[in-house]
Image (cartoon, rainbow, N blue to C red):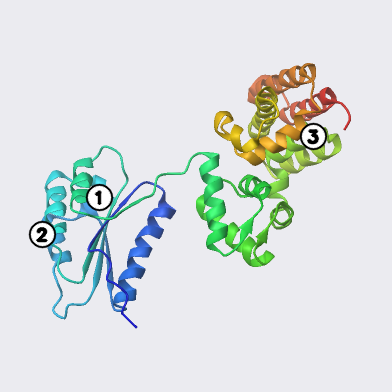
């Protein structure tokens, strides 16, 4: 059996998403150790090195052991060291792998461009900020763990766990392990009960569905666990905006509407089912209630909790019975 190939001697990792950066570096280390299990790993904050220090870290050892040298925060280096990195990266010693980690952006971009021209494979780790990107990450994490996740469960998991990628990755892996590989909305709510049920989005879901008792229960859970009133008010307004946008778009294919509306297909599909029960006058009344409670929780009302409860009741009443 042929030995595994040696990794490229120069690698470039660009981006600010810490978890993805760490994984990219770990993959390089794993490749190097697959070829040579004795490979040493040295990590440096690049700006703390001098050109002489860099040359020493990249010099071959007496017995030619493998080595991975990771230069973190390379965007912080000065002009002299940036020049030295490019020069020494162009002529690496045998068995040495140099990994340059750069946050992206304009700072020291010339160095990044020069390393690209040297043929460095590039791993991009841009910060994940949009919901759709986070949803893609969750789906990828579930696949990485060997499972599959229902479209509706993706949003529920993000609402329950939050936006932190480490927590989302851990939750996805745990759900796959505990469910045997198939993750649905019920599983997410079962394993994250409390957080999922207490989020502002859970309150909003119950409200737009006209579930008065369920909305009040979810609201009290949120208040008990300390969910900020502003977040609940924002979730109510967001749910109503979603209904209005989807309602005005008509009964089109959710997959085709996802781009123009800027939301995932599962969310459009869900809103299409809900908006049938909302006539224009009801939505107008609900928007008025949402605007009022937004002002109330930001200081217009003496009791934010009471203002939220009143808004929930007012919006449910606007929709009418289920």
User: Which residue is pictured at 23% across the width and 41% down the height?
Assistant: 109
What number is the disc on residue 74? 1
Q: Quadrant of residue 49?
A: bottom left
| Closer mark to the observer between disc 1 and disc 2 | 1
Structural crowding at the residue carrying mark 2, measured as other residues with C-alpha within 10 Å and reported as few (<14), some (14–19) or many (≥20): few
Percent x, y of residue 23: 41, 59
Percent x, y of residue 180: 67, 67
Structural crowding at the residue carrying mark 3, measured as other residues with C-alpha within 10 Å and reported as few (<14), some (14–19) or many (≥20): many
| Closer mark to the observer between disc 3 and disc 2 | 3
Percent x, y of residue 285: 77, 18
Percent x, y of residue 213: 86, 37
| Closer mark to the observer between disc 1 and disc 3 | 3
Gap in Å between the C-alphas at discs 3 and 2?
66 Å
Disc 3 secondary structure class: loop
Residue farthest to the right? 321
| Mark 1 vs 3, N-terminal side | 1
Disc 1 secondary structure class: helix
**Quarter the N terminus occupies:** bottom left
Relative to 304, is 94 above or below?
below
Task: Say whether residue 170 is visible.
Answer: no
User: Which residue is pictured at 28% across the width and 74% down the height?
Assistant: 39
Q: Quadrant of residue 250?
A: top right
Residue farthest to the bottom? 1
| Mark 3 vs 2, N-terminal side | 2
**Quarter the C terminus occupies:** top right
Gap in Å between the C-alphas at discs 1 and 2?
16 Å
What number is the disc on residue 52? 2
Q: Are marks 3 and 2 in contact (CB under 8 Å)?
A: no
What number is the disc on residue 209? 3
């Amino acid at each position: 059996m042929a030995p595994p190939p040696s990794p490229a001697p120069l690698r470039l990792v660009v981006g600010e998403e810490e978890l993805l950066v760490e994984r990219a570096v770990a993959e390089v280390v794993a490749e190097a150790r697959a070829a040579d299990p004795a490979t040493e790993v040295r990590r440096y904050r690049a700006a703390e090195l001098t050109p002489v220090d860099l040359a020493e870290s990249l010099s071959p050892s007496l017995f030619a052991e493998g080595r991975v040298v990771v230069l973190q925060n390379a965007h912080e280096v000065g002009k002299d060291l940036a020049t030295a990195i490019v020069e020494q990266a162009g002529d690496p010693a045998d068995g040495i792998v140099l990994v340059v980690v750069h946050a992206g952006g304009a700072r020291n971009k010339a160095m990044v461009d020069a390393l690209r021209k040297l043929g460095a494979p590039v791993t991009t780790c841009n910060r994940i900020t949009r919901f759709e990107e986070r949803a893609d990450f969750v789906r990828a994490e579930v696949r990485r763990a060997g499972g599959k996740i229902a479209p509706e469960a993706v949003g529920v998991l993000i609402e329950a766990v939050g936006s932190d990628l480490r927590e989302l990755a851990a939750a996805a892996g745990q759900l796959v392990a505990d469910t045997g590989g198939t993750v649905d909305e019920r599983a997410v709510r079962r394993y994250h009960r409390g957080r999922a049920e207490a989020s502002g989005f859970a309150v909003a879901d119950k409200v737009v569905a006209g579930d008065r008792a369920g909305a009040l229960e979810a609201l009290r859970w949120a208040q008990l666990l300390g969910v900020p009133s502003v977040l609940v008010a924002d979730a109510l307004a967001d749910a109503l905006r979603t209904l209005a946008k989807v309602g005005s778009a008509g009964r089109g294919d959710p997959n085709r509407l996802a781009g123009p509306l800027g939301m995932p297909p599962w969310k459009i599909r869900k809103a299409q089912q809900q908006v049938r029960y909302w006539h224009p006058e009801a939505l107008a009344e609900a928007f008025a209630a949402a605007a009022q409670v937004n002002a109330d929780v930001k200081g217009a009302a003496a009791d934010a909790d009471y203002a939220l409860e009143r808004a929930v009741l007012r919006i449910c009443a606007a929709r009418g019975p289920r």
